Amino acid sequence: GQQVMQIPQYQHVQEGEDFTTYCNSSTTLSNIQWYKQRPGGHPVFLIQLVKSGEVKKQKRLTFQFGEAKKNSSLHITATQTTDVGTYFCAGTGNQFYFGTGTSLTVIP
Amino acid sequence: DGGITQSPKYLFRKEGQNVTLSCEQNLNHDAMYWYRQDPGQGLRLIYYSQIVNDFQKGDIAEGYSVSREKKESFPLTVTSAQKNPTAFYLCASSRTGTTYGYTFGSGTRLTVV
């Protein structure tokens, strides 16, 4: 069945370093969404990408959808302690699936 | 302000008991969802409903039941048939279709004692 995998599962970075999480699907996706879940909180919708090769930015966050629409990435420039949390991708193939998530720890 | 409310925040259940988790939204969303979150396993879909009086099983529906009698409400019952119910349960809603982002409730943490 369709799966959406994310790597890495965990990432520790020093404050100010960059961070990237990757999302890979076994099937072509019609869209990809990204969510952030703070520790002890609930997922919050960040953005949606629908076009092949699409790139969108939100301040220090850059989201990219692959040309084949099977992968996506989220890049954070110069991490801050407020970036701490788990980042999930979610995509629509034959069904809508959430990725396994990447837990980000930022060391002050 | 529009939003989605889950209650209670924490719930303790004795083995063999059924418990019902509440989920209410005032966003006028047609679709509602229940997810289970376990450490390191992401979000797994239990049930979803795209319209009143209709709902579909997700990937891990065994041991759970739902109802959708009103657009605003989508309660989840964790039955005694669910062998490992301790988890964080998240309710979400969206406009119909997966091209819209989900709005999540703050979750219910269920513990079996």
Image (cartoon, coloured by chain):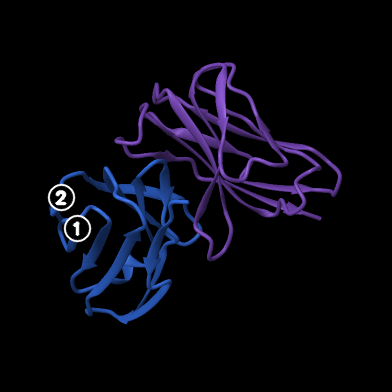
Chain colours: A blue, B purple
Q: Badges 2 and 1: C-beta atoms under 8 Å apart?
A: yes
Quarter of the C terminus of chain A within the rendering: bottom left
Label 1 sits on a secondary structure element that is: loop
Residue at image point 13% right, 52% down: A54
At which x and y percent is residue A78? 19, 74
Query: Given the image, on which type of amino acid does mark 1 rest?
Result: Gly
Q: Which residue is mark 1?
A: A66
At which x and y percent is residue A61? 20, 61
Q: Which residue is mark 2?
A: A52
- Whether residue A12 is situated above or below residue A45 in the rendered picture: below
Query: Given the image, on which type of amino acid does mark 2 rest?
Result: Ser
At which x and y percent is residue B79? 76, 39
User: Residue A104, can we see it?
Assistant: yes
Residue at image point 30% right, 48% down: A33
Q: Nearer the viewer, residue B63 or A95?
A: A95
- Whether residue A55 is situated above or below residue B29 in the rendered picture: below
Label 2 sits on a secondary structure element that is: loop
